[in-house]
Amino acid sequence: MIEVILPVLDEVQAIPGVLAAMPDGFTPLVVDNGSVDGSGALARRLGAKVVDQAQRGFGAACFAGLQAAGSEVVCFMDCDGSLDPQELPRVTGPVVRGEAKLCLGARSAAPGAWPWHARAANRCVAFELRRRCGVQLTDLGPMRAARREALLELELRDRGFGWPLEMVLSAAARSWSVTEVPVSYRVRDGGRSKVSGSMTGTWRAVRDMSTLLA
């Protein structure tokens, strides 16, 4: 089994669909990051393993899931319905086969799924990664896979929105092979993304990532 770490903050509308779509060989590990809509309780009722992380922050939730996981290979994926769990084998494939140590899903967005400000910020970050580190990525994708012990050895410290970027920067600094594969990106199931759903969310992500790039 490959565990799929799902950071959750008030995703009660999307959770049933995400959990139901998990492909064979993958099991969800939900990290409830202080939801007030009953997301964690719902995930438990649906049979998912749930970890409570009181410290707010995307990175804090991801790290708690990484610590709680037990599978050799782990995945990270947003739990808002924007990503298709059925595409997880595509992302884990290069890691399982030893072709890459870190694989990201490069998003192909449906109309209305990815606001212009979030897309522009993401492209800037990807450009900086190519320029500074030689990592050939087009997207700092939220669906990704790597071996758990290797990720722990990176000793990632960011507990906010900078976590995904720090992972790639640290991997590049250690000469990891990093690749990406295409995945679909849909309009999320209810609510609004904490990052791309508003200019404020995008600004916070850019602020956290700019600190790391500096």
Image (spheres, rainbow, N blue to C red):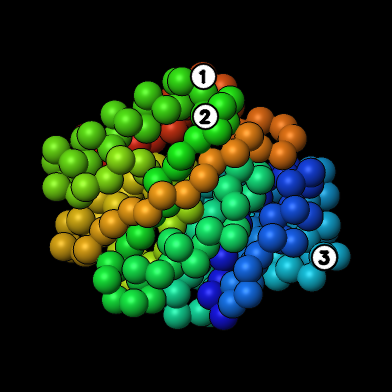
The spot of residue 108 in percent (x, y) is 46, 39
- Alpha carbon of mark 2 to alpha carbon of mark 1: how far? 12 Å
SS at circle 3: loop
Q: Quadrant of residue 81?
A: top right
SS at circle 1: helix
Which residue, given by chain and number where applicable, does mark 2 sit on?
114
Which residue, given by chain and number where applicable, does mark 3 sit on?
46
Q: Is residue 74 above or below residue 112?
A: below
Amino acid, disc 1 = Met
SS at circle 2: loop
Q: Quadrant of residue 48?
A: bottom right
Determine the residue positioned at 16% across, 62% down: 175
Determine the residue positioned at 60% across, 58% down: 85
Q: Nearer the viewer, mark 3 or mark 2?
A: 2
- Alpha carbon of mark 3 to alpha carbon of mark 1: how far? 34 Å
Which residue, given by chain and number where applicable, does mark 1 sit on?
199
